[in-house]
């Protein structure tokens, strides 16, 4: 990847085509879902001549993955890891990742951090909220984190005491990089301002943010408080590391592994400069393929070349998802994912939306296949109250459909509390 990032567009295109051919040939032979689909379409993965031949295949979405989870696993897959994500629409999704894809995704991340002078083994603080990471703090994980000098701070609960400890941890470690949600890093930076703590003398090279839309005010606050540039990263656990920002301010697609299409509402491919849904084909997903996967995000491709000299194609606009914070009755500010994870891990729930009206009232809209029983509803209420306060009213509405916002986007958590 260090070498290929400097290839020109034509060479990268040819490389993508070879890898795409290999992926499609492999899944045609070894993945039951695609073996059946290709036969039905009379599609030969080995015979494609252009990346646009992908358009002959139907789109892949969360509903299809949920319905065909087992048949999407390769017959040759070994040591798959199970993952669970809520997705942009709040619909729980279970999928699997093999070691090949893990290695490619990690390589994409570290190549991008090297653009900013941060390498593997440099001290790093990660502000994150996924239970997958938080529950993995066993002896092996702790040993690995000590070796590569990574410290994980949970983004769920942000009491004043926790925020004070975060600032202390950052100052003590003096990391070369901060990595995490832009909303979480911005919140920590804001707390530093309130506490009048100077965090601008730690030698931090870059704050890398991902998983949410980065807003201009967040970028400005993080950069000012920690005295470092802010680099945006676009991707997700299901779609992979799609694009990263270079020091020249452009978002480079990880073209060696990722093919990005922009499509309109009818599923037709759009040229650079036109906004549409971002569709991703991940070329390192032989074990559990993501081919023409609908991310649920909107974006715009760019056909210009970055002045940094890299041939990696650009995505110039990402109209991605955002996640609000919520506040508990005792004043604890926590990442909205703390509530999302309660609902997304209940198999019967197909979609949901959470609205915090005020400190004493939460509305939850839930779509299920067969409805929730009294025990499950009671469990949801108890889990929400454990995080927000025992006297909070939890109003659960079981509905057939949850409408999108006027903007067309789906916000699966909204907090109306000002903090």
Image (cartoon, helix red, strand yellow):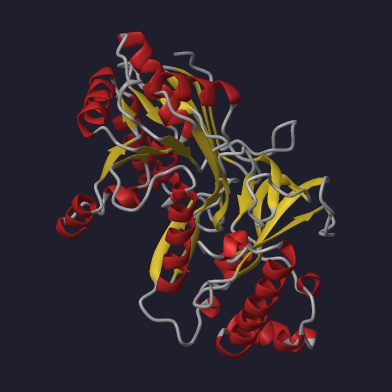
The answer to whether 74 appears left or right of 16 in the picture is left
- Vertical placement of 388 versus 63: above or below? above
Residue 25 seen in the current view: yes
- Vertical placement of 363 versus 341: above or below? above
Q: Residue 144's x, y, as percent?
A: 22, 57
Q: Residue 149's x, y, as percent?
A: 24, 47
- Taking the spot 41% from the left edge, 42% from the top edge, the residue there is 377
Q: How many marks?
A: 0
Q: Residue 140's x, y, as percent?
A: 18, 60
Between 212 and 226, the one lying in front of the other is 226
Between 248 and 163, the one lying in front of the other is 248
Question: In the picture, residue 361 is in which quadrant?
Answer: top left
- Vertical placement of 24 versus 391: above or below? below
Question: In the picture, residue 55 is in which quadrant?
Answer: bottom right
- Taking the spot 44% from the left edge, 13% from the top edge, the residue there is 419
- Taking the spot 23% from the left edge, 20% from the top edge, the residue there is 161
Residue that protrudes farthest toward the left in the picture: 139
Question: In the picture, residue 275 is in which quadrant?
Answer: top right
Between 127 and 114, the one lying in front of the other is 114
- Vertical placement of 351 versus 44: above or below? above
Residue 372 seen in the current view: no
Q: Residue 245's x, y, as percent?
A: 57, 43
Between 91 and 303, the one lying in front of the other is 303
């Amino acid at each position: 990847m260090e070498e290929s990032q400097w290839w020109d567009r034509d060479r990268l295109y040819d490389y993508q085509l070879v890898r795409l051919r290999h992926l499609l040939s492999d899944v045609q032979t070894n993945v039951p879902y695609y073996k059946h689909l290709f036969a039905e379409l009379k599609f030969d993965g080995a015979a494609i001549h252009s990346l646009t031949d992908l358009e002959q295949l139907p789109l892949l979405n969360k509903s299809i993955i949920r319905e065909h989870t087992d048949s999407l696993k390769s017959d040759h897959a070994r040591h798959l890891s199970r993952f669970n994500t809520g997705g942009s629409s709040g619909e729980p999704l279970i999928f699997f990742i093999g070691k090949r894809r893990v290695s490619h995704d990690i390589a994409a991340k570290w190549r991008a951090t090297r653009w900013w002078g941060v390498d593997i083994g440099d001290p790093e603080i990660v502000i994150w909220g996924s239970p997958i990471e938080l529950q993995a703090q066993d002896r092996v994980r702790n040993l690995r984190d000590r070796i590569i000098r990574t410290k994980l701070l949970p983004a769920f609960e942000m009491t004043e005491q926790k925020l004070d400890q975060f600032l202390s941890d950052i100052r003590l470690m003096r990391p070369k990089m901060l990595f995490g949600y832009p909303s979480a890093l911005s919140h920590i930076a804001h707390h530093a301002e309130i506490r009048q703590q100077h965090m601008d003398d730690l030698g931090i090279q870059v704050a890398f943010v991902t998983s949410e839309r980065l807003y201009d005010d967040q970028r400005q606050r993080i950069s000012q408080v920690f005295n470092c540039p802010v680099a945006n990263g676009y991707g997700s656990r299901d779609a992979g590391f799609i694009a990263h920002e270079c020091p020249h301010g452009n978002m480079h697609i990880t073209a060696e592994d990722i093919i990005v299409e922009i499509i309109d509402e009818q599923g037709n491919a759009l040229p650079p400069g036109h906004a549409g849904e971002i569709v991703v084909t991940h070329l390192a997903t032989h074990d559990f393929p993501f081919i023409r996967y609908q991310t649920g995000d909107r974006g715009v491709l760019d056909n210009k070349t970055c002045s940094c000299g890299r041939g990696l194609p650009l995505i110039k606009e990402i109209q991605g998802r955002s996640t609000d914070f919520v506040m508990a009755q005792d004043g604890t500010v926590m990442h909205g994912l703390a509530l999302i994870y309660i609902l997304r891990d209940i198999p019967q729930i197909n979609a949901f939306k959470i609205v915090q009206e005020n400190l004493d009232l939460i509305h939850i809209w839930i779509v299920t296949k067969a409805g929730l029983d009294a025990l499950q509803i009671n469990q949801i209420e108890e889990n929400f109250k454990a995080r927000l306060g025992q006297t909070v009213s939890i109003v659960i509405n079981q509905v057939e459909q949850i409408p999108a916002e006027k903007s067309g986007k789906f916000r699966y958590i909204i907090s109306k509390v000002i903090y």
